[in-house]
Amino acid sequence: MDRVALSPELELSRLVYGMWRIGDDADTSPRHVQAKIEACLEQGITTMDHADIYGGYTAEAIFGAALKQAPQLRDQMEIVTKCGIVAPAGRHSAVRGKHYDTSAEHINASVEASLRDLAVDRIDLLLIHRPDPFMDPDVTGPALDALVASGKVRAVGVSNFRPWDFSLLQSSMESELVTNQIEMSLMETSAFTNGDLAYLQERAIAPMAWSPLGGGSLFKNAGLMSILEGVAGEQGVDATAVAVAWLLAHPAGILPVLGTNNLDRIRKIGEAARLTIDRQTWFELYSAAIGKEVP
C-alpha cells in the first residue's frame, strides 16, 4: 500500500478506513472491532478516520475499547478525528440545537474527550469538521497551533472547507493545514471543476475524499455501472474497486476514506490500489457520471 506524506511529521496510507458507521454494526464488541482493524492492517491500510460526532458521540469509544483490549495495534496505525459539530446527542444532549463551535474551549474539550474515548495519548491528525460561519480565525488558528505544540496532536487540517475558508483559517496559523477532507466520488464530481481540488493541487496539499462510493448511489446509475463492470471484469475485481481506483488515478493524490462493517468487504478494500485507470477510461467514467460528454 502506497503512503502519502502530508507533512514531514505525518504519513497516511493511501486508502483510509472510515469509522462513520462503526456504531451501526450489530456487533460492536472490542473483539469484532479488532478484527476490522487487523483486516485493514493486513492490507497496509493503517489510517483510521473518526469524528467525535460519529454514532452520536459513541463511535470513538467503541474503537477505543478495542485498543484497550489490543494496545499493541496503536503503534501500527494513524488516528484521524474531527471536531466542531455540536448536536443534541450523547455528551451534548442538553444543547438546544445543532450548531458549530470552533472556539478554543470547545476544540480543547473535544480533543480531551477524543483522547480519552479513543484510548490514545496523541491524535495524529485533527480536522475541523465543517466550516463555521461564526469562526474567529484569530481564536481557532492559535488553538490548533497550541495543540500541535503540546504534542497532543501531530498535525491539523480541515474537512468540507471551501478555498476561502481554508485560506482564512490558515492566515491565522503557524502550523500548516495539511489536508481538506471533502466529498468526492463518481456521484459527486463538483470538486473537480469548482476550484476545490485545484486549490489543493496548487498548494501540493493531498486531499482526502469522504463517501468515495457516493453512498452507494452509483450502483443505481445503469450507464455508469456498465462501464465500471466492464473495467472490473478486465482487471478481475468488482465495480466498487474500480470506482475507488478512479479517484486514486487523479494526479491530486486523493486519499479515499472507505467505510463498511462487512469483514469480507473490508478485506477487499485494498484491491483498488492495484488497478490501473488510464486517461481515456477515466474520462469514460467521468462522462457517464455527469451524463454527457465533456464540452
Image (cartoon, grey):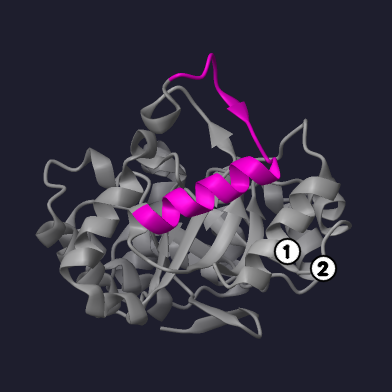
Q: Name the residue under label 2.
A: 174
Residue 89: x and y in percent read 40, 26
Q: Which amino acid does label 2 sit on?
A: Glu
Residue 288 appears in the figure: no
Q: How crowded is mark 1: few (under 14 residues within 10 Å), some or many (20 or more)?
A: some
In the rendered image, residue 143, in percent from the top left (x then y), is placed at 71, 54
Label 2 near label 1: C-beta < 8 Å? yes
Q: Which residue lies furthest to the top in this view?
A: 96
Asked if residue 111 is among those painted magenta in the image, a careful observer would answer yes
**Residue 121: where, in percent of width, then height?**
42, 68
Magenta-span inclusion, residue 106: yes
Residue type at the position of mark 1: Asp
User: Which residue is disc 1 drawn over?
Assistant: 145
Give the numbered dot on residue 19.
Answer: none
Which picture quadrant has residue 265? bottom left
Magenta region, residue range: 94-116
Q: Position of residue 190 (x, y in %)?
A: 68, 45
Residue 220 relative to residue 265: left or right: right
